[in-house]
Amino acid sequence: MNTDGTPGGPQGMPRSGARPGESVWDYPRPPELAGDDRRVTVRAGSQVVADTHASLRVLETSHPPVFYVPRGDVRAELLRARPGRTHCEWKGTASYWDVVAGDLVVPRAAWSYEQPLGRYEALRGHLAFYPSALHCTVGGEEVVAQEGDFYGGWITSEIRGPFKGGPGTGGW
């Protein structure tokens, strides 16, 4: 664990064998999309909700990446549309989803942009999941959730902060 609470090796370097480190302060604003072919899994209890090698990452200054999984790699029968919407100035209006796996109901565990704006059109047909609500892995590595539940960032060993989202970071 790094001194700033993020996973990784000494002085913010990724663990041995991991990908090169990325500082969230090198990510752009407005955010950019990047494809990622590592295996991404999402579980609710013992149920696999999503499993893909074709995710998209949204990279935005001060935030850990958010992984978006193609709908075809998500078990649609485990999703239930949830009332309520939010709006992102770049990506558009987000819709929310509960994950229902047997008796386990995880409210508002996922979101999507059904009609994404402009350069974010590639997000159409993808879902993002809150790692604070579900068990998420990237390349076999367990994801640590970004502090605060608004942004939903996925922290892995190569990602370095500090990260926006926790108490006292609203003015960054």
Image: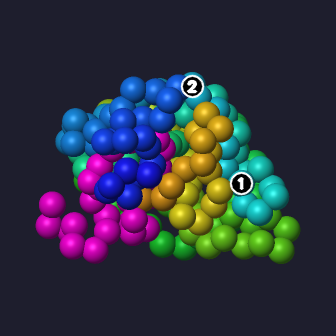
Image point (55%, 58%), residue name: 131
Judged from this view, the residue extending furthest toward the right is 102
Residue 119 percent across, percent down from the top left: 32, 33
Image point (65%, 56%), residue name: 135
Per the model, the C-alpha gap separating discs 1 and 2 is 19 Å
| Residue 77 falls inside the magenta stretch | no
| Residue 162 falls inside the magenta stretch | yes
Earlier-in-chain disc, 1 versus 2:
2
Q: Is residue 73 left or right of residue 126?
A: right
Residue 44 percent across, percent down from the top left: 73, 60
Work out whether residue 148 or residue 13 is closer to the camera in this orientation and state it.
Answer: 13
Residue 115 percent across, percent down from the top left: 44, 46
- Magenta portion: prevailing SS class: loop
The quadrant the C terminus occupies is bottom left
Q: Residues within 10 Å of mark 1 (few under 14, many from 20)?
A: some
| The label number, if any, that marks residue 108 in the structure image | none
In the displayed structure, would residue 10 be above or below residue 166?
above
Image point (21%, 68%), residue name: 170
Q: Residues within 10 Å of mark 2 (few under 14, many from 20)?
A: few
Magenta-highlighted residues:
147-172
Image point (72%, 73%), residue name: 105
Image quadrant in which you'd find residue 45: bottom right
Which amino acid lies under the numbered mark 2 shown in the image of this protein? Asp
| The label number, if any, that marks residue 43 in the structure image | 1
- The residue indicated by pointer 2 is 37
Judged from this view, the residue extending furthest toward the left is 171
Q: Is residue 24 left or right of residue 10?
A: left
Residue 8 visible, this orientation: yes
Which amino acid lies under the numbered mark 1 shown in the image of this protein? Arg
